Image (cartoon, rainbow, N blue to C red):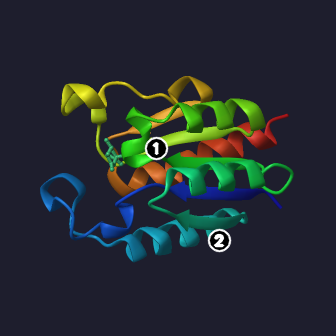
Amino acid sequence: MIKLLVLNGPNLNLLGLREPKLYGTRSYDELCAMIRAHAERRGIAVEIVQTNHEGVMVDRIQEARGVFDGIVLNPAAYTHTSVALRDCLLAVGIPTVEVHLTDPASREPFRAVSYVRDACLATICGHGFDGYPEAMDLLLHTLTKC
Ligand code: DQA
């Protein structure tokens, strides 16, 4: 069975409360329920982790080696700052899809840069919650085609 880690960064636990005009009114728990339902539909195992701490994200990616087949990663604000996350993804080499609920490139200029983008298979931006099942399907397709 394919095992995916869904790793969400800072402030995503506040979905539903944070800037609802940008992120919508559905909660983080609703996002997790949607991800779990999709995993069940596809017959894959999923673990969902949210942390506000960059080092914990690095630890979880390192620990994913040999445990998870792929990662769905929304690094949130660390997207635009974290060389450590980028280095970690390049070190472990686990197929990873970067997801953002919004389209960061159409927001403030400082969001245009993603340090993780070219360490990932693909980036899905601006599809809201749907970006997560799309990323899971992309990984499933990539992991089962070889
Ligand atoms: C985000 C976009 C980031 O720029 C922002 O810092 C977030 C969420 C998104 O999902 O749209 O926290 O990753």
Classify 114 as above or below 142: above
Please state which amino acid type lies under the numbered disc 2.
Glu
- The tag on residue 61 is none
Classify 16 as above or below 99: below
Give whichever of 96, 145 is nearer the camera. 96
Q: Is the C-beta of the residue carrying label 2 under 8 Å from the nearest atom of ligand 1?
A: no
Quarter of the image holding residue 125?
A: top left
Q: Position of residue 20 (x, y in %)?
A: 16, 61
Q: Is the C-beta of the residue carrying label 1 under 8 Å from the nearest atom of ligand 1?
A: yes
Classify 134 as above or below 15: above
Give whichever of 116, 35 is nearer the camera. 116
Q: Position of residue 104 (x, y in %)?
A: 29, 35
Q: Which residue is mark 2?
A: 40
Q: Which residue is mark 1?
A: 99
Q: Residue at x 75, y 32 (%)?
A: 91
Q: Residue at x 19, y 34 (%)?
A: 107
Q: Position of residue 131 (x, y in %)?
A: 43, 48
Classify 93 as above or below 43: above
Give whichever of 68, 40 is nearer the camera. 68
Q: Position of residue 135 (x, y in %)?
A: 55, 46
Q: Residue at x 63, y 48 (%)?
A: 58
Q: Is residue 112 left or right of residue 61?
A: left
* Number of residues whose C-alpha sits closer than 10 Å to that of mark 2, classed few (under 14), some (14–19) or many (20 or more): few
Helix, strand or loop under label 1:
strand
Please state which amino acid type lies under the numbered disc 1.
Val
Q: Is tag 1's residue or tag 2's residue first in the polypeptide sequence?
A: 2
Helix, strand or loop under label 2:
helix
Q: Is residue 93 visible?
A: no
